[in-house]
Amino acid sequence: MQLFPGLPVLQRELAELASRRRTYVVRVVAICAMAYVIWKLVLSFSAGEAEVQTVMGAQRFEAALGAGGPIFEGLVTSLFWCIKLMMPALCCAVVTTEKERNTMGILLTTKLTPGAIVLEKLLSRVIPMLTILLLVFPVLGYLYSLGGVDLSKLSGTFWLLLLECFLMASIAMMYSCWFPTTAMAFIWSYVTVAVLVLMGLVTRDSDQLFLLPSELWDAGLRASSFGELLDETMGTMIVIASLLVLSRFFLVGRAFVSERSITLKLFRLLDSFFRWLNARTTGGIELIRDRNDLPVHRPLTWREESRKALGKVRYLFRILVVLELPTFFLCTLSAIASNERAFQALFYVEYVLWGLGALIVTVKSCTLMSSEHARETMSALLATPLTASEILFQKILGMRRLLCVVAIPMATVSVTHYLLFGNYVSMHAIGYLLVSITSIVLMLLSVAILGTIVGTRVRSQTKSVLISITLLAIWCALPLVASTFAESAVGRAAYVTFSPYSLLEASERFLTGMLMFGRHWNYVDPIGQVWWIPVLMIYLIGVVASLGFLHLRGDQLLGRPETFGGRSSAERV
Amino acid sequence: MSSPAVSIEDLRVSYGTFEAVRGVSFEIPRGEVFGFIGPNGAGKSTTIRVLATLQGKFLGNATVCGIDVRKDPQKVRESIGYMPDFFGVYEDLTALEYLHFFAAAYKLPVASRRSVIDDVLSLTEMTHKANASVDGLSRGMKQRLALARVLLHDPDLLLLDEPASGLDPRARIEVRELLKALQDMGKTILISSHILHELSQLCTRIGIIETGQLVAQGSLKDIFGQLNLRRVIHIRVESPTDELLERIGRIPGVDSVEPGPDRWGIRLREGELSIADFHEALVKEQARLVMFQPEAMDMETAFMKLTEGKTA
């Protein structure tokens, strides 16, 4: 820590990071992921493992010459993705934690300038990221020694990786300074990164100015010298500087911003606009007025549905319009322009909708209970005669409208597939529709239950959101990674079954493998014909078992005393 | 004979390796106001949480109105009104909606809800704030609203954890008066507080807890007797003489007399001579009183003498 004597914030942040077990877990996971990528790249470069040993070893060294190029490119692409995925998560909490702990005032009353705070905080997150990248650098050096990578490309790559780190960190830093909670900063950081990546994909063939250093790298590092490279990345550097300047102003201006729901605020703003518009156009005629009722039997459901932004029918209808309109447009476009085979383009829309739906439901479900902790209303609620299962199920029931709103665009894509198939009355088509809609329901329920369980155990809303998203990502990704080790298609399907992604793939393979490909390409997908059965069964049993667990172990989850046939949990211990 | 409102026997609560409550035992007969005193981290809130059925794991026995907290927590919840030491805010509700919300949570009959809520609003003098947003209420108003909430289902036992903390003097007096009214209604109240002077005016019994152990319990008089505390009374007489001072010093029950520039400080042995008897004895000694002022810091003295200032 003596390395940074004049940088107290950086010193403290690094000391805090060093004392957290999570830091080391993240490093180990990142390194394992990198090792896996390197292994896959080497395998894909060579015909087989045996040949790899020959090529990469000393037996036929001349055969390995030039082999570094393609592996290097694959590895660097993975590093760019690693930065995109990890840097926002590392950096988004850097200022919001100060706000959440109410230590922002203390920090701002020291002699440190806001600019210095922003820079030190930024460095405190970039340095750990660079240490992770540093671990891969020896491998890059080895690949350079194999040939196929020149020195200017190597140095240019290092520069672009550094810039990518700073760009991602400064995006997350700006949101961290703007938002009151880590959860909001986290979500918006990733949404921004996703938009930038999509924009890059859309404009990748045009002769444009590259914003993301990874795009410039993908375009083949056109600069012949480092000076030219600096010139080409000037735009990125200006963006980074602008984001940091904005962060400096937000750090002071929004240091004590309240933790009100931004969605609710936005909807109320829209309400006043629509009321004004209605007053001007119709003289204030309202066809459907808001019911101002009071709770009768299910108070928690009542509050979720009548007092929350993601519960009110009027507000949810707006979300439905925002989600459904573009989905409907894309589905219609696909229906007009495509033949039966080409409707697979809609699968990408389906992936996006499933991902978005899972994210919305996760955030909502894990804040159902953790918001009670955060607002210190949990004790009063738990001291009422409501049973634990009543509390949990009333809360989950309060999400039913949101689940429907999220499910409708997903179901729209499935219905489009069904309609495009052409033979509406065939058992296969109707079966697909039923399987697909059941899959959607099961996926949303699984995610909602997972989020609710995490929310009962984690008191902080931010932590519960981050933990739920992380668990969901691991749940989805781990079986998929494991499936790459499978040697047969059945083995792969067996692994993938344990990822919620299987619900999507199994229902689609039921349609495409069995019907369309079967008819036109004379191809039969034997796994697709039956895979949906175990997948639906497993997730149905899982959902029922989870609901049973919530019912039976609700008291334990909520921290109330439990009774086991007259003996207390303490006595059992 | 009816069971006591609260009975705790050898209560032990641990958080990991830290033992927050170490063998606490006490009883509160019905209709009493029990003051629970102790420094921060002494184990007051944990003990109250056990009675409120919020503590997942504990050892020992705890009953509320004869119902075992562990065996039938659901029934216990119907008999208690618990007010935590912080006021959680449903910022999206009005005071009326907040009470309706909890009325539904307490499963009050729908037909009688309106009148019950009107009654508790009236009792807590919150009727004029019924449609105000909970978020916008002052801290004192929020405490009153919380008291209104715990009264909704007419519980036998009120568990009030620091109800006066963070309140300004006026709000504190208002809460105290409200608690006196509840005491008059025959409610059993377990109240924890740091404001000892207020507890002494309200409580019929007290328990002093430090580092998870109960160091004293009983009525104020019992505790003063146990500690052999002296009650100090300041008096001023019309024509003070050394002879009168000597005669007062000889009154049975008077421990010592300290003459000051404008008053005399008389120390009475607690339990031997009451304030009223001392007053009568002074009149018999023909002392023409200009001022008669008993010191009102008795519980603070007891607290300081019984506790060592240890914290968790």
Image: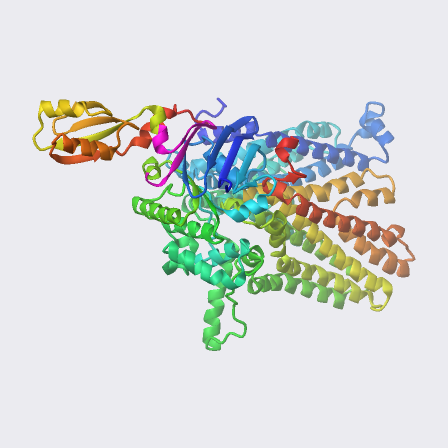
Seen at 52% across and 71% down, the residue is: A289
- B285 left or right of B108? left
- Visible in this render: residue A276? yes
Is residue B202 on the magenta stretch?
yes
On the image, which quarter does residue B250 sit in?
A: top left
- Figure check: A475 above or below B286: below
Q: Quadrant of residue A431?
A: bottom right
For the question of whether residue A341 can be seen, the reply is: no
Q: Is residue B229 above or below residue A129?
A: above
Q: Where is residue A339 in the image (x, y as percent from the top left)?
A: 81, 65
In what quadrant of the picture does the C terminus of chain A appear? top right
* Residue sitting at x 71%, y 43%: A475
Q: Where is residue A218 in the image (x, y as percent from the top left)?
A: 68, 44
Location of residue A21 in the rendering, given as x and y in whole percent from the top left corner: 60, 29
- In this rendering, the answer to whether A213 lies above or below B59 is below
- The magenta-colored residue range is B201-223
A107 with respect to A154 (left or right): left
Residue that extends furthest to the bottom in the rendered view of this protein: A282
Q: Nearer the viewer, residue A262 or A82?
A: A262
Side of A442 relative to A557 (left or right): right
Where in the figure is residue A552, as x and y percent of width and height? Answer: 68, 45
Q: Does the magenta stretch include residue A503?
A: no
The quarter holding residue A53 reads top right
